[in-house]
């Protein structure tokens, strides 16, 4: 009876030690693996810390290049750009359509990025509308949606300023695509 | 027991895994319990031992490299214009990038050490003997793959260190008979180093080699399991299971390896804390040299420390030419590897096994000795006393190093000559070490400057960081000056300890702080204008300028102190280097106006120097309009014999920017501009230092 008990307790002791060894082994192994995993996740998430910065007004063109005929014209947006480690000076970073209606001084600027999925919206002069080549979203020359359309909203208008001397500048922004609301990317 | 899929299971496994319905379901689909069981419940004859941990730590190290390597890959860009740049970004700008790269870099080194330990344990324990021969060979292949990854990874940052070390390694590959040049061209990706060298090395480092390694590792582990662990004899303890006994020891060893690796990475941080200095994360982990530049010599080029023994071994064959290199780089290492492959065969006999042990220890000891020799040669000057060899230096200088003359000076005494030759060799060793240490220092300066430039708000141009370094006056100025100007001109702070010694050796003016107040004050100081730091060692020593400063300028009736100050102030204003001289606004304008009048006055400076509208003809003395400005300096360096400078009285200065027809200029226009900018101290300074920095902060 006593022998049986001592055998049991010896087995229990072995089991307890095994369990403890297992726990310590898992802890040590886990701890050893932690630094590379932490470093990898930390570095991999780096892009989440980057932002394109606050939207600023960028010079676009001169008012004389935008005749008051209601016809949109395409202009590149030129700015200094940083792409990770590379700095680009005065480079085209996007495109906009600029339009001035007959008899007005008011300049309208539309982003050429389709609000549906981000393709480049083209101006279809023959049809007198904007058309996205990717999923056939169509927009009026004012940027209004032509139903039925895969695009959830009208073309994105951009704030613009015209100086007294006639310099047109635009507040360049990118917006989230595929949603009804126009929300600027940060 | 048979489940729905007909899969047979051994009883009792449910207990092991707890037997929940999820694990039952998963096990019925995957049979994972059997897998886990076979992985963990391996018998370890004689119980768990510390000596068996090396294989596991190697697998752990490899997994660390895979994890860190994959994320590094996500940010690395393999091309000659983006490799250094992307690594710079990882190291200095990406959150946690320094730790990621540090772990990858240091663990690679740890892996080499672990490899050596693993091989040693296997050989000493005789674990290569039948039936484990094939597994030993697989292990040797794994070793070569790991070393191959170390070699290819060294180049990827495309910095000076990796570039030059890899050039040597690939050139050595070219020594292989018949196919060598083709191998070299294939590895390099063409006849020259560039984009394709990087893309190919990267493909090797992150693709071919690790993929092959995984295949061989699987085979290695499969055979290891097939034959079981080779227990160290004699077995004195009862058998144990791999889990948890050996796993515990393995895990503790892995933790120790990681602790050492982290310790190496974080050591500089600890040093900074102790010294009360701020910790710069970018300075932790792996270093990044200046961008690779094939036109820039790099005397600090050395392979990574674990290949240093091969580098040193090649020196044994110095003087043997290409044959020696072929022997040292290919034949001997190849033969060594060949012997290692034969070890399982030799090991069948007791004597053979002993030979294997002695051979392995000898190889490791030899490698250790060669490494120590290489380090000793490189760092010899740190502890050697050069002044003890002053007499040797003197004798070499006085005899011009001519052996006959030296022998004569030693009284034709052969014993003395032997002693002298011995000491001369030691002196040469000190000199070589000094040159290496200087090169290491220069490399560190170049590297931190390149990093500083890359961190400008404008970032790196698309032409790459090398173009940034090449158009940086602070990086290029001193090198161009040393190469083209220093044979005559000094460039040293006059208050420096050895300044007078340097002036005495120079044959033209000291250009330190040229155009600044301190320089102009010296020029107009009667005690200094005729001295070695100005005109003293030139043809103008007794010229009109020296006599003007010594006689006219000291005449207090003619030149009031205020007038002198106004002239000095105005000249500095002409150079555009007035900052920090105190006067501002209208006060400054007034003084300059007065100074301009004095300089233009044809009874004063204007009697010789053309200035403003004084109508003094060009050609007698240098034009003082814009004196010391970048444009003025570019002009005089381009052509000192131009009418604006010294058309008739130029004293030996070459026309650096003028070439005869069909010839090349001694300095390109860009280089002349860089030297001028450097002399004027006009180079990029990071915002935090800009206020405190001056021309004195050049290297």
Image: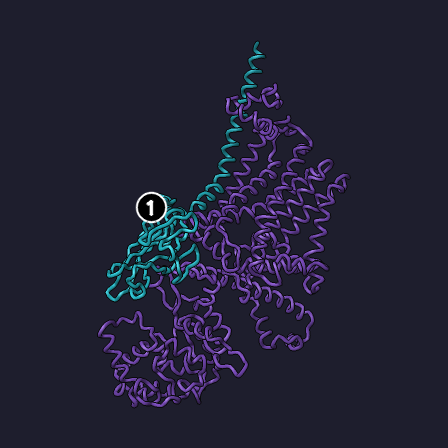
Chain colours: A cyan, B purple
Pick the residue in front: B394 or B676: B676
Q: Residue A180's image quarter?
A: top left
Left or right, B661 with reference to B496: right
Tell me the quarter of the image containing the C terminus of chain B: bottom left
Q: Position of residue B98 (x, y in %)?
A: 46, 49
Q: Is residue B188 above or below residue B56?
A: below
Left or right, A47 with reference to B45: left
Q: Could you say whether the residue bearing mark 1 is in a helix, strand or loop? A: loop
Judge whether residue B316 can be spotted in this image.
Answer: no
Pick the residue in front: B333 or A60: A60
Pick the residue in front: B680 or B661: B661
**Residue found farthest to the left:** B586
Judge whether residue B669 can be spotted in this image.
Answer: yes
Q: Residue B398's image quarter?
A: bottom right
Q: Position of residue B241 (x, y in %)?
A: 61, 27
Pick the residue in front: B567 or B551: B567
Left or right, B272 with reference to A160: right
Which residue is depicted at the point 32% across and 87% down? B606
Tell me the quarter of the image containing the N terminus of chain B: top right
- Please give the residue where the numbered disc 1 appears in the rendered image: A153
- Identify the subunit bearing mark 1: A
Which residue is depicted at the point 23% across and 65% down? A164
Q: Is residue B329 above or below residue B402?
A: above
Q: Position of residue B389 (x, y in %)?
A: 57, 68
């Amino acid at each position: 009876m006593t022998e049986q008990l001592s055998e049991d307790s010896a087995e229990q002791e072995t089991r307890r030690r095994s369990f403890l060894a297992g726990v310590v082994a898992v802890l040590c192994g886990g701890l050893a693996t932690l630094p590379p995993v932490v470093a990898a996740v930390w570095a991999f998430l780096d892009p989440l810390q980057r932002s394109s910065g606050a939207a600023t007004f960028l010079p676009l063109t001169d008012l004389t290049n935008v005749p008051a005929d209601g016809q949109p014209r395409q202009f590149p947006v030129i700015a200094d750009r940083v792409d990770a480690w590379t700095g680009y000076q005065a480079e085209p970073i996007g495109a906009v359509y600029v339009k001035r209606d007959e008899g007005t001084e008011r300049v309208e600027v539309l982003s050429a990025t389709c609000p549906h999925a981000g393709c480049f919206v083209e101006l279809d002069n023959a049809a007198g509308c904007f058309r996205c080549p990717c999923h056939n979203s169509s927009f009026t020359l004012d940027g209004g949606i032509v139903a039925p359309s895969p695009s959830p909203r009208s073309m994105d208008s951009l704030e613009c300023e015209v100086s007294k001397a006639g310099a047109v500048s635009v507040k360049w922004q990118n917006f989230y695509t595929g949603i009804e609301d126009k929300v600027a990317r940060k | 027991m048979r489940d729905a899929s007909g899969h047979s299971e051994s009883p009792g496994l449910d207990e092991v895994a707890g037997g929940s319905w999820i694990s039952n379901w998963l096990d019925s689909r995957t049979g994972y319990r059997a897998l886990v069981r076979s992985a963990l419940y391996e018998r370890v004859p004689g119980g768990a031992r510390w000596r068996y941990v090396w294989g596991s730590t190697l697998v752990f190290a490899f997994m660390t490299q895979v994890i860190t390597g994959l994320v590094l890959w996500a940010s690395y860009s393999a091309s000659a214009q983006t490799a250094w740049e992307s690594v710079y970004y990882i190291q200095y700008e990406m959150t946690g990038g320094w730790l990621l790269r540090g772990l990858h870099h240091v663990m690679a080194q740890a892996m080499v050490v672990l490899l050596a330990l693993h091989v040693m344990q296997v050989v000493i324990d005789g674990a290569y003997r039948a039936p484990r021969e094939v597994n030993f060979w697989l292990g040797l292949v794994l070793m070569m793959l790991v070393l191959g990854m170390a070699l290819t990874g060294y180049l990827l940052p495309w910095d000076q260190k990796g570039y030059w070390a890899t050039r040597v390694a690939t050139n050595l590959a070219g020594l292989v008979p018949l196919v060598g040049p083709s191998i070299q061209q294939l590895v390099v990706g063409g006849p020259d180093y560039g984009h394709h060298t990087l893309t190919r090395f990267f493909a090797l480092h992150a693709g071919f080699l690790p993929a092959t390694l995984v295949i061989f590792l699987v085979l290695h582990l499969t055979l290891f399991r097939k034959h079981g662990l080779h227990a160290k004899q004699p077995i004195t303890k009862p058998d144990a299971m791999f889990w948890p006994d050996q796993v515990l020891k393995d895990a503790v060893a892995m933790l120790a390896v990681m602790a050492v690796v982290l310790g190496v990475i974080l050591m500089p941080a600890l040093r900074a804390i102790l010294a009360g200095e701020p910790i710069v994360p970018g300075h932790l982990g792996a270093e990044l040299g200046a961008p690779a530049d094939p036109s820039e010599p790099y005397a600090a080029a050395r392979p990574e420390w674990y290949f240093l023994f091969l580098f040193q071994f090649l020196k044994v064959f110095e003087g043997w030419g290409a044959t020696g290199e072929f022997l040292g780089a290919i034949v001997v290492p190849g033969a060594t590897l060949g012997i290692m492959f034969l070890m399982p065969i030799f090991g069948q006999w007791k004597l053979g096994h002993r030979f294997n042990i002695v051979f392995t220890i000898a190889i490791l000891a030899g490698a250790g000795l060669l490494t120590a020799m290489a380090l000793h040669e490189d760092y010899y000057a740190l502890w050697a006393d050069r002044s003890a060899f002053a007499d040797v230096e003197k004798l070499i200088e006085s005899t011009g190093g001519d052996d006959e003359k030296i022998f004569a000076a030693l009284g034709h005494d052969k014993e003395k000559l032997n002693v002298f030759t011995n000491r001369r060799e030691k002196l040469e060793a000190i000199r070589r070490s000094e040159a290496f240490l200087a090169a290491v220092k220069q490399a560190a300066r170049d590297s931190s400057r390149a990093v500083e430039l890359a961190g400008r708000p404008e970032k790196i141009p698309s032409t790459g960081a090398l173009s940034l370094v090449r158009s940086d006056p602070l990086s290029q100025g001193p090198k161009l000056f040393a190469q083209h100007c220093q044979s005559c001109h000094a460039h040293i702070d006059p208050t420096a300890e050895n300044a007078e010694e340097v002036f005495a050796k120079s044959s033209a003016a000291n250009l330190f702080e040229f155009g600044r107040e301190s320089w102009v004050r010296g020029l107009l100081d009667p005690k200094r204008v005729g001295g070695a730091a100005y005109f003293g060692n030139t043809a103008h020593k007794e010229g009109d300028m020296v006599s003007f400063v010594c006689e006219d300028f000291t005449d207090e009736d003619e030149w009031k102190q205020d007038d002198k100050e106004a002239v000095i102030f105005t000249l500095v204003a002409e150079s555009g280097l007035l900052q920090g001289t105190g006067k501002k606004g209208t006060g400054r304008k007034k003084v300059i106006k007065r100074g301009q009048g004095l300089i233009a006055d044809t009874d004063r400076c204007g009697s010789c120097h053309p200035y403003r509208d004084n109508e003094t003809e060009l050609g007698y003395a240098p034009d003082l309009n814009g004196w010391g400005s970048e444009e003025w300096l570019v002009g005089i360096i381009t052509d000192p014999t131009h009418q604006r400078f010294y058309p008739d009285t130029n004293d030996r200065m070459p026309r650096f920017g003028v070439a005869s027809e069909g010839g090349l200029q001694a300095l390109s226009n860009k280089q002349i501009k860089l030297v001028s900018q450097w002399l004027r101290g006009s180079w990029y300074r990071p915002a935090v230092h800009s206020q405190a920095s001056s021309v004195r902060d050049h290297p």
